[in-house]
Amino acid sequence: MKSIAAQILLLLSLLGSSSPFYVPHLSGVGCSGRGHGSKDVHSSFATSLSVLSDSIEVPTSLRELDLKEKAKIFGRLADKYILLDESGGDCCYSGCKDCEYRDPDGSYRMAEMLAARPKWIVPYSRRSFGSASGLKDHSSRWLSTLFSETPSHTKSTFISAFVELEYQQPLGGPYLSVPEGTDISATSVESFADLIFQGKESMSVKQCERIIQGWKGGEGLVWNDWIKLIE
């Protein structure tokens, strides 16, 4: 058996790239980085997020809120900026044939996006990548504020902290002035807390991240996504 295996390996080495078993090495072809192994990890991660999304229970009280109250919640959650580059800065965006970061249609997701007004509920508390000369770093406006002084919240402390979050006029939804958006009902805040806590007694920032990532497979939510989620 060892002899046969050795002969097969020798044959493959002689055939080189003409062999149907030959797998080209990605390093040095344009995309520096993590190789095929990381793609498997990413795929597993995406699958787990999809499962999590299916298990989220949206409180009836949240579904039944007035549209303006839903907008008041969104205006406390949304950011103007979002980091999306799943390659962590490794992709060179040069159209490499076997690049693991390209979508099935051959296109790329933008590495980052910026809007004039808050647009995305970002799925992370903080994300950073790149080198010292080109570091990209972003912290979620609402998550970083909520957990700035504590590693975790009970539902009661979460509600108290959420009420204090600044309302900013977002892209999408009914127009509300800042004073109108700031005045949020107790029912709205408690309903949102129920969506986050999902029956748990406490919630850490990492647990909160996982809940948010489950809302849309790890991507940021715009207004229409938010409404679809809670309706």
Image (spheres, grey):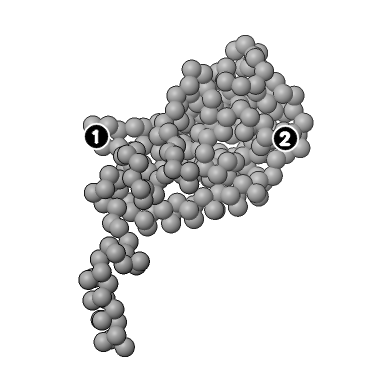
The image shows residue 161 at horizontal and vertical percentages of 56, 28
Three-letter amino acid code of the residue under disc 2? Glu
Which callout, 1 or 2, points at the residue further toward the start of the chain? 1
Residue 126 in sight from this viewpoint: no
Corner quadrant of residue 64:
top right
**Nearer-the-camera pick, 219 or 125:** 219
**Nearer-the-camera pick, 155 or 93:** 93
Q: Which residue is mark 2?
A: 231
Three-letter amino acid code of the residue under disc 1? Ala
Q: Residue at x 45, y 51 (%)?
A: 42
Q: Residue at x 65, y 49 (%)?
A: 54
Q: Residue at x 26, y 37 (%)?
A: 131
Q: Residues within 10 Å of mark 1 (few under 14, many from 20)?
A: few
The image shows residue 132 at horizontal and vertical percentages of 24, 34
Corner quadrant of residue 94:
top left
The image shows residue 181 at horizontal and vertical percentages of 63, 17
Instruction: Determine whether label 1 and label 2 are within 8 Å by CB.
Output: no
Q: Which residue is mark 1?
A: 132
Q: Secondary structure at mark 1?
A: loop
Please determine whether, in this image, residue 161 is positioned above or below residue 217: above
Label at residue 62: none
